[in-house]
Amino acid sequence: TEDQQLIITDVLIGFIQQHNHCRGSGDARIVGSDGVTYANIPVYSTTLGNASSQATQISARSGFVIPPNTSVQVKWYWGWNECSRSDFQLAYNLTGYLSTP
């Protein structure tokens, strides 16, 4: 509701590439509707050489507060990448709860 703050307890970010010879990096940012960046989570994906599965790297952040009446979104900012950017996917999970300050 409008008078409750959001406590984000956990953020998991997974960076997945479609080809195991491509690497990439960037920052996933949790940005509020108030313009504040509440979390900046660096994500990096490396190669697996001849491995049969896709390369994935997971980053995490936990325990930050979003003020009442503020929505949040995850925004992606590329650092660098090999191959086409369409060969990469970003998956994320946000968990938390509402609390009265």
Image (cartoon, rainbow, N blue to C red):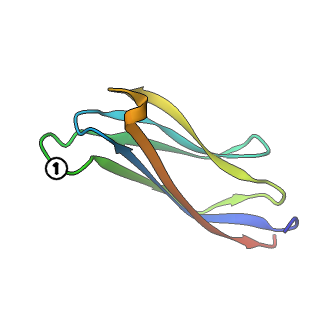
SS state under label 1: loop
Give the position of the C terminus as an image quadrant.
bottom right
63 vs 101, left or right, is: left
Residue at horizontal 58 percent and vertical 43 percent from the top: 29
* Residue neighbourhood size for the residue with mark 1, other residues' Cα within 10 Å, grouped as few (<14), some (14–19), many (≥20): few
Q: Residue at x 46, y 46 (%)?
A: 90
**Could you say which quadrant of the image residue 48 lies in?**
top left
Depth order, front residue of 33/7: 33
Name the residue tied to disc 1: 52
Q: What residue type is labelled 1?
A: Ser
Q: Position of residue 100 (x, y in %)?
A: 81, 73
The relative height of residue 100 versus residue 89 in the rendered view (above or below) is below
Relative placement, left or right, of 36 versus 17 is right
Extreme right residue here? 3
Camera-side residue of 21 and 2: 21
- Residue 63: image location, x then y, percent: 59, 63
Q: Where is residue 36 in the image (x, y as percent from the top left)?
A: 72, 43
- Quick check: 30 above or below 22? below
Residue 47 as seen in the image, left or right of residue 25: left
Give the quadrant of the N terminus: bottom right
Vertical placement of residue 12 versus 40, above or below: below
Picture quarter containing residue 5? bottom right
Tag count in the figure? Answer: 1
Q: In which quarter of the image is residue 22?
A: top left
Q: Which residue is drawn at 12% across and 42% down?
A: 50
Instruction: State the residue lying farthest toward the left.
Output: 50
Q: Where is residue 41 in the image (x, y as percent from the top left)?
A: 50, 45
